[in-house]
Image (cartoon, helix red, strand yellow):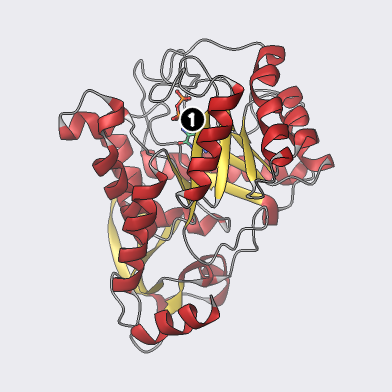
Amino acid sequence: MTYVRPIPLADATRPEGALPLAGGPLFFDRVEILERGRPPVVLPAAELDAATLAPLTAPRPPVAGLAMDRPQIMGILNVTPDSFSDGGRFAALPEALAQAQALVAAGADILDIGGESTRPGAVEVEPAEEIRRTAPVIEMLRGQGIAVPVSIDTRKAPVAEAALKAGADLVNDVAALTWDAGLAAVAATREAPVCLMHAQGTPQTMQADPRYDDVLLDVYDWLAERIRAAEAAGIPRARIVTDPGIGFGKTLEHNLALLRRLSLFHGLGCPILLGASRKRFIGTLAGEPLADRRMAGSVAVALAGAAQGAQILRVHDVRETRQALILWQAITREAAETAAERRQA
Ligand code: HH2
């Protein structure tokens, strides 16, 4: 079996015949053909047939009201006592609300609210406790007129149900609907978009000794299977986002292999979410043991994701990521396009 990875053009030039990557803003005119056990082969995109090109080029419908034709920033709000980076800081309601407001003011397009840490070694939280942590925050955000879409970061049906009732718009499941058999039905019934993230193992065990035949292709096949399962459960592809799950059962080399060829996942026909913010591999490479001092590395990874066409960047450092994206976009687009956009804004 072969896999096709579009190779995004890195700058503002648009060679004759270049194709939009997932509807834009990036373009590609070459692809890499990947096969297990073989070195990649680069081909002109023009040599592929229309059926192969369709999922790579088709515009993605908006998700929770967010346009998918540009990178959108998902600000992380963990209302947990034990998250690896911001645990305990926003667990009380007033702090959570203030942080949500700060993230929106800093440029978050969507907020991701989590009431259970999934860091390596984290212990499971009872659904009732997870609901107690998350639903009131979402209700309060809505009550205070914070209008940005809200995502609930949970593996559990009752938690998602309570969050959606409280005003959440999207279900972000780090287990891709494999943890709780009831979660798919909740998302399907409520017509909520879902993020399906790849993980190997559970948070308790996932970093013990993760192994793959070919990490990139194994994660791709697994996500393809999870998309089929979600569709069978009544969640249409238009409401599915995929995520390779950086740091979830992956070594440093696994994470890098996924980031280097992230654009492969456009072949799944769904928007790509990338969550690498402050994660351990950044600390390992940069020699920074403290998670909250990994902002610069996190921004670099977010930009690398944007350059591969990732549509949603899940980050702690919203202000810095927004600034970096504005500059990257200004430099990598044609002046005419940028001027037209400014006029529209
Ligand atoms: N990473 C974390 C949690 N949720 N969701 C998606 N879709 N993708 C990710 O990469 C992802 C995620 C872990 O990060 P964080 O929320 O900062 O920490 P913790 O799990 O300790 O709360």
Q: Locate residue 242 relative to residue 16 in the image: left or right.
A: right
For the question of whether residue 175 can be seen, the reply is no
Q: Neighbour class for label 1 at 10 Å: few (<14), some, many (≥20)?
A: many
Up-down: is 161 above or below 223? Answer: above
Identity of the residue drawn at 38% across and 44% down = 216
For the question of whether residue 106 can be seen, the reply is yes
Q: Locate residue 230 relative to residue 324 in the image: left or right.
A: right
Residue 274 position in % (x across, y down): 44, 45
Residue 232 position in % (x across, y down): 76, 43
Q: Which residue is mark 1?
A: 199
- In terms of image quadrants, where is residue 115? top right
Q: Amino acid at mark 1?
A: Ala
Residue 152 position in % (x across, y down): 64, 34
Up-down: is 290 above or below 138? Answer: above
Q: Locate residue 183 relative to residue 301 in the image: left or right.
A: right
Identity of the residue drawn at 43% across and 28% down = 248
Q: Nearer the viewer, residue 186 or 212?
A: 186
Q: Nearer the viewer, residue 276 or 131?
A: 131
Q: Locate residue 16 relative to residue 256 in the image: left or right.
A: right
Up-down: is 53 above or below 300? Answer: below
Residue lying at the far right of the rendered structure: 189
Q: How many marks?
A: 1
Q: Nearer the viewer, residue 345 or 111?
A: 345
Mark 1, secondary structure of its residue: loop
Residue 273 position in % (x across, y down): 49, 47
Identity of the residue drawn at 29% across and 69% down = 10
Up-down: is 77 above or below 262? Answer: above
